[in-house]
């Protein structure tokens, strides 16, 4: 720091008496400088304390700070009424998926930091629209799913604890809590891979655990079923080789081919909704595709299939449930169906950008392909998809962000291109 000296009088050589006004000004100046130095040191200390939280573990503290400034002006208590809360602008479903309870803006700064890091380990920068805007890039821990070393302040334990996260999970949900339960059941021999997605396999294991431990087979993952992954009984299904084989039945005489437009018999043992996958869904999709629906026949019940199910139900005066059951099954062969240029409802829980992959992206790509765009419908948001997103945003006078959200989604059906 440069050495300071008292201000001089008009004459460089003139002595300055300690009890003159210039002396008093010097003392005031010294006090101002000292107070300024103290304030600067305090600010540094506060910044260091704030950035010793869990969220500084992977991306740098500066990266997290830039993200927070863009999302919320670094305000941990913010609630502007837009259904997003706190420094990282969590919505409630995402906050609960990483183990949070209550409202994010009511949690401590340290807890918000820790849960932001959990989300980053699960999904990278993808959930934050501001991440590409401020130029953040992912490291090797992004999307790794490794959360066991993250300590959430106030929770009393690290991410490896099996304390119930406070969220009830059902078919179609996704979250870090589901992944933790799946991995524990996999350790005990269940056929689960730990994707964090509550699908048909997870539902079967949940019901098996409930049945083997005397709980009602609700299929919902709540606190009692959660604890059973660590403390309850579990045995895998009886191997097929132990089941006595029955004598083969004589083959029945071949039946005549069904008449045209007669629906095959519904033989599935369950009803289907978003997130499910089966051969039954695939058969229905292919039949609807033959009737003009924009479906590819993957067997995956995604947003596009949901939109077609609801359209068929509405056009045939059924209750619009979005569930594929025996009545909706028959309509693929016998019911009324007309295609529409009205965009399906945006049902995704997130916005998409370069590097993401999902069924929603695939549906959008296929719709744009039908309009003449050279996209293949892989579901991968790559450079070609980014270029088309930007072009259609520009052609329809939207802000050119390169992000696929609800407004850009609709343009694939209704916008100029």
Image: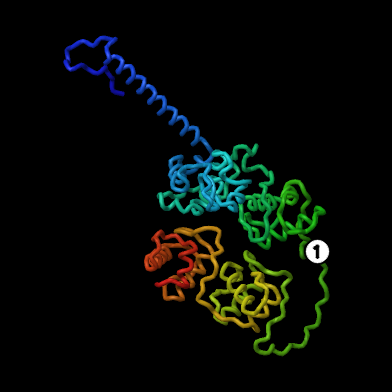
Can residue 254 be seen? yes
**Residue linked to disc 1:** 242
Crowding near the residue tagged with mark 1, few <14, some 14–19, many ≥20 C-alpha atoms within 10 Å: few
- 185 and 353: which is toward the camera: 353
Q: Residue at x 40, y 63 (%)?
A: 398
Type of colouring? rainbow
Q: Considering the image in quadrants, where does the C terminus appear?
A: bottom left
- 172 and 3: which is toward the camera: 3
Q: Position of residue 282 (x, y in %)?
A: 62, 74
Q: Position of residue 349 (x, y in %)?
A: 55, 59
Can residue 279 be seen? no
Q: Residue at x 73, y 75 (%)?
A: 267
Q: Residue at x 41, y 24 (%)?
A: 38
> On the image, which quarter does residue 251 sit in?
bottom right
Query: Under tag 1, what secondary structure?
Result: helix
Tell how many labels: 1
- In the displayed structure image, the side of residue 44 where residue 120 appears, left or right: right
């Amino acid at each position: 720091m440069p050495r300071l000296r008292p201000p001089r009088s008009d004459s460089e050589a003139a002595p300055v008496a300690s009890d003159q006004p210039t002396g008093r000004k010097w003392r005031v100046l010294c006090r101002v400088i000292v107070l300024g130095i103290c304030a600067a040191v305090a600010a540094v200390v506060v910044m260091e304390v704030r950035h010793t939280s869990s969220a500084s573990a992977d991306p740098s503290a500066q990266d997290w700070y830039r993200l927070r400034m863009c999302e919320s002006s670094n305000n941990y208590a913010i609630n502007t009424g837009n259904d997003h809360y706190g420094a990282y602008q969590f919505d409630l479903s995402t906050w609960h998926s990483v183990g949070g309870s209550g409202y994010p803006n009511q949690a401590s700064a340290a807890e918000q930091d820790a849960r932001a890091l959990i989300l980053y380990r699960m999904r990278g920068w993808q959930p934050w629209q501001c991440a590409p805007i401020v130029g953040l890039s992912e490291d090797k821990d992004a999307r790794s799913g490794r959360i066991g070393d993250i300590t959430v302040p106030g929770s009393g334990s690290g991410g490896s604890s099996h304390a119930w996260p406070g969220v009830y999970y059902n078919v179609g949900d996704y979250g870090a809590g589901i992944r933790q339960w799946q991995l524990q059941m996999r350790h005990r021999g269940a056929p689960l891979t730990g994707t964090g997605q509550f699908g048909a396999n997870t539902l079967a294991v949940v019901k098996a655990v409930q049945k083997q431990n005397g709980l009602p087979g609700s299929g919902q993952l709540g606190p009692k079923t959660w604890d059973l992954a660590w403390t309850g009984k579990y045995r895998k299904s009886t191997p097929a080789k132990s089941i006595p084989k029955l004598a083969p039945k004589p083959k029945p005489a071949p039946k005549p081919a069904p008449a045209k437009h007669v629906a095959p018999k519904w033989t599935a043992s369950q009803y289907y909704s978003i997130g499910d996958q089966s051969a039954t869904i695939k058969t229905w999709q292919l039949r609807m595709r033959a009737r003009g629906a924009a479906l590819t026949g993957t067997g995956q019940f995604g947003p596009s299939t949901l939109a077609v199910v609801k359209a068929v139900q509405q056009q045939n005066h059924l209750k619009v449930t979005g569930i594929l059951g025996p009545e909706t099954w028959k309509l693929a062969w016998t019911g009324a169906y007309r295609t529409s240029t009205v965009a399906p409802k945006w049902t995704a829980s997130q916005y998409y950008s370069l590097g993401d992959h999902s069924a929603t992206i695939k549906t959008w790509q296929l719709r744009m392909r039908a309009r003449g765009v050279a996209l293949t419908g892989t579901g991968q948001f790559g450079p070609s998809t980014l270029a088309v997103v930007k072009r259609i945003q520009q052609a329809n006078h939207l802000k050119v962000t390169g992000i696929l959200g609800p407004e850009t989604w609709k343009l694939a059906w209704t916008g100029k291109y």
